[in-house]
Image (spheres, rainbow, N blue to C red):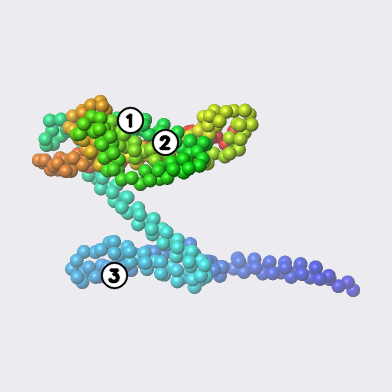
Amino acid sequence: MLQPSRGAARGTEKRTEAVALTVRTVTPGSALAGNRLPRTTPWLVLAGALLASFALFGLLAAASGGTLSVVGAVLVAAILYLLVITVMSAIVEGTRQAMDRFVTGLVTGAFLLAMVPLVSVGITVVSNGLARFDGEFFNSSMRNITGEGGGALHAMIGTLLITLAATIISVPLGLMTSIYLVEYGRGRLAKTITFLVDVMTGIPSIVAGLFAYALFAVFLGPGVRMGIVGAVALSVLMIPVVVRSSEEMLRLVPNELREAAYALGVPKWRTIVKVVLPTSIAGITTGIMLAIARVIGETAPLLITAGFTASMNYNLFQDRMQSLPVYVYTQFANQGNPAFAFFERAWAAALLLILIVMALNLLARLIAKWFAPKTGR
């Protein structure tokens, strides 16, 4: 008689084990048999932790005669949820999965905790600023206004002109500096420039305002207040941001593109203009928009350099010029009668400033999408 070979016997054993494993996998109630908690378990544990925590804090509030602490109840519920879900996961799923669930809970909790002040600020600004978000606020200034009424048109024009002038000053200087550091800079000079740019990134805004004021005071005398002085102060804050963001985007351009252009006999300056810059234009534009959003809300340098006024001023090189951040500050600091009118104007200007920053970020994303290199046909 023919005896089955050892290879055939081993194959039969493997098939038998596979069938047995399949049978065990599809056995009813295999959610726990496979060392995995059901998907609804974390939500049920979270709901139970919230109910237990709010019930405990409600009893304490009723016993002491005080109010229910919602923040304390939520924090205790979060701690209770982490403990219970970690213990359950360790018993059913093992130590590694339990640690994964614990860290996931910590990260999610940190994210929600970070969102609380952001959402709170947004709700507060919107609820307080909508009261004066009307036509008069957008088409009138504060000239001859001592009480109710008035608007922030002069501050909007001032913010637009000062920020535009600062952008015109900062973008060419910052972009050319980044091109030099990436394409040409070598040795001590490039390292020194990089070090100075890093130092300028951390300069307080008030120092930039003092620098611009002192610079113009040398030529025009003390007490000078003009929009162009504020633009120079903002450019001091913008230039390092533009340099660093543009430098990182230029370094992301593959060297193969440069080498291909050089192999065709294209000069280096033309390679930068026609190959390097178009490839990185999306990231550079995003960095510029973020730099503008970073300085458009600065108050201290503009308070020193541009001052504040209640009248319209379209000339950057003459007299004081109002801006939205300084407008918010003056409305809060110099309250008149009735006080609520000044508060409403300040909150409306703050809401407008937030909307401008959001619009700039949205515009940066759209520009990055439009100018991004096309990889497909």
Task: Look at label 1 and name its amino acid.
Answer: Ala
Task: Look at label 2 and name its amino acid.
Answer: Gly
Determine the CA span between mark 2 and mark 3.
Answer: 58 Å
For marks 1 and 3, the one nearer the N-term is 3
**Residue at mark 1:** 165
Q: Is residue 35 left or right of residue 176?
A: right
Residue 179, position in %: x, y? Answer: 48, 35
Q: Disc 1 or disc 3, which is closer to the eye?
A: 1
Label 2's element?
A: helix
Which image quadrant for residue 377?
top right
Q: How many marks?
A: 3
Q: 32 or 126, which is in the foreground?
A: 126
For marks 2 and 3, the one nearer the N-term is 3
Q: 122 or 247, which is in the foreground?
A: 247
Label 3's element?
A: helix
Q: For the point 63% across and 29% down, which residue is it? A: 264
Determine the CA span between mark 1 and mark 2.
Answer: 14 Å
Q: 366 or 227, which is in the foreground?
A: 227
